[in-house]
């Protein structure tokens, strides 16, 4: 399961949003949430999220074994349905 988030509060002026993807790493009885991709964005359109999402998929060594993506922004939600139609959003 991936958790995706975008915030506008820490970025100002030219860059307006920080977009990040997190996953959980488990070892024995310990689980940690780890950010594994962050992107500083200057625009927040559907096209921008498609470019970022495709870029993430392109740099992965193999297709992700993700079955579920949790996120809250509609633009990202729509993007993930386009880029990764087999993953539940």
Image: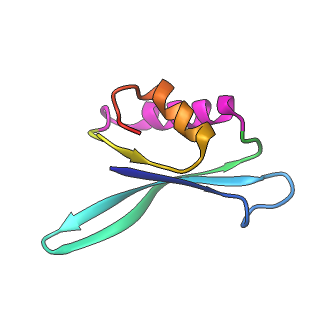
Residue 14 position, x and y percent, is 84, 51
Please provide percent x and percent y for residue 33.
37, 66
Give the left or right position of residue 11, taking residue 68 as reference.
Answer: right
The image shows residue 56 at horizontal and vertical percentages of 48, 38
Q: Residue at x 33, y 35 (%)?
A: 61
Query: Which quarter of the figure is the C terminus placed in?
Result: top left
Seen as rendered, the residue at the extreme right is: 13
- Residue at the bottom extreme? 30
- Taking depth in this image into account, of 47 and 73 the one nearest to the observer is 73
The stretch drawn in magenta includes residue 59: yes
Residue 34 lies in the magenta-colored region: no
Nearer-the-camera pick, 46 or 40: 46
Q: What stretch is highlighted in magenta?
A: 45-64
Look at the magenta stretch and give its main secondary structure: helix
Name the spot of residue 34 as percent of width and height, x first: 39, 64
Which residue is depicted at the point 40% across and 45% down?
69
């Amino acid at each position: 399961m991936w958790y995706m988030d975008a915030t506008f509060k820490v970025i100002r002026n030219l860059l307006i949003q920080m977009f990040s993807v997190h996953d959980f790493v488990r070892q024995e009885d310990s689980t940690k949430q780890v950010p594994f991709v962050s992107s500083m964005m200057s625009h927040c359109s559907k096209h921008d999220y498609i470019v970022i999402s495709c870029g993430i998929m392109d740099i992965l060594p193999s297709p992700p074994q993700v079955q579920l993506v949790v996120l809250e922004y509609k633009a990202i939600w729509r993007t993930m349905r386009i880029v990764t139609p087999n993953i539940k959003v």
